[in-house]
Image (cartoon, rainbow, N blue to C red):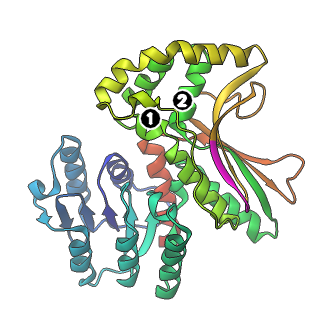
Amino acid sequence: MVFLGFGRVGRALADQMAAPIDGQPAVRVVGLLDRSGYVFEPRGLSRQRLLHLTREKDSGAFLTALGGTAASAAQALNEMAGHAVSRPVLVDVTSDETDDLLRAAVGHGFDIVLANKKPLAGSWAQYERLLESVRQAGRTMRYEATVGAGLPIIDTFHKLVETGDRVLRIEGSVSGTLMYVMSAVSSGTPFSQAVREAVTLGYAEPDPRDDLTGADAARKALILSRLLGYRGPAPVAQDLVPRSRKSVPAAAFLDRLAAFDGEWAARVAAEAANGRVLRYIVTATARSVSAKLAAVPRSSPVGSLEGTRNLLAFTTKRYRTEPLVVSGPGAGAAVTAAGILNDIYSLSAR
């Protein structure tokens, strides 16, 4: 197992792998990569060293300062591929454009597990090229954690299709950050306070505009729609960042966000008068995909959600009248790491 990226999610994954679950196959972590370089041990990093590296990275250290080797990610993978590591798996926990690196990795014999959405949410040509590279190399790619963190969203789709059903539509909330903010605002919390809380609790990025633009939700919607056969362009997500606040520093953005609290409160009150709440909703079909703010009945499944919970409803040939619903926690490094770990175990058990 090689981690491409060793940020919050990668470190949460390392913590979980250091405490193996009874009955699951043994998995060795042989390599870690960050922006400075890599650490590699063909026989596997010991539990003690893995936890030590995790603690030091939590403190802000780079791998090159922890006994690692300075190199680009491509150079590191070339070096690792030269060793006889059995059934290697590359786990992409970055948020970078890693398409070329992933295609090189499968050429080196790596299977791939993705938490990074960007390689699956570029142009259709880029997406198809990656899938074809995996097929031609005879490798496997898993990406459950790209949508819904640890929830079995991709798995549910495949199980429905494998049993002869046809998925017509997938709709719901896939951003734990936006759910947290919208549910808090709908309950009376000022918008600026809800955003700051999401950052403090680790649900949002340090610059919450990365979440408030809706770009992350739109990528998830595109991944789902492509499962259904959609080949069109990426959706234009509804952006919740005020235009006048797009280019200011992150700290200034948070400091000045209270200026919009009144506007949000008025909108919430208007919808509440009609029994509705605000939620950020994605919709995926074989013909279209969208990501936008919507007013939904408070009594509906997605309207009743609180905190960081995700919910996706599958409308299928069999579940046409009453969609099949998958719901649960949808934000945080630990739950995302759990989704990745499930993919890793599924590959190791083959």
At a point 24% along the width and 56% down the height, the residue shown is 50
132 over 24 or under it: above or below: below
Residue 288: say if magenta. yes
Query: Label 2 near label 1: C-beta < 8 Å?
Result: yes
Q: Is residue 144 above or below residue 283?
A: below
Residue at x 32%, y 49% (from the top left corner): 11
Q: Amino acid at mark 2?
A: Tyr
Residue at the disc numbered 2: 180
Left-right relation of 233 to 199: right
Residue on which the image places disc 1? 203
Instruction: Looking at the image, tell me whether mark 1 or mark 2 is earlier in sequence order.
Output: 2
Where does the magenta region start and end? 286-291
> Which element carries disc 1, helix, strand or loop?
loop
Q: Nearer the viewer, residue 135 or 225?
A: 225
Q: Is residue 150 rendered to the left or right of residue 312?
A: left
Pointer 2 local density, CA inside 10 Å: few below 14, some 14–19, many at least 20: many
Instruction: Measuring from the top left, give residue 230's x and y in whole percent.
Output: 67, 65
Give the amino acid at mark 1. Tyr
- The local secondary structure at tag 2 comes to helix
Q: Position of residue 191 (x, y in %)?
A: 50, 20
Task: Locate residue 110 relative to residue 281 in the image: left or right.
Answer: left
In the rendered image, which quarter contains the N terminus?
Answer: bottom left
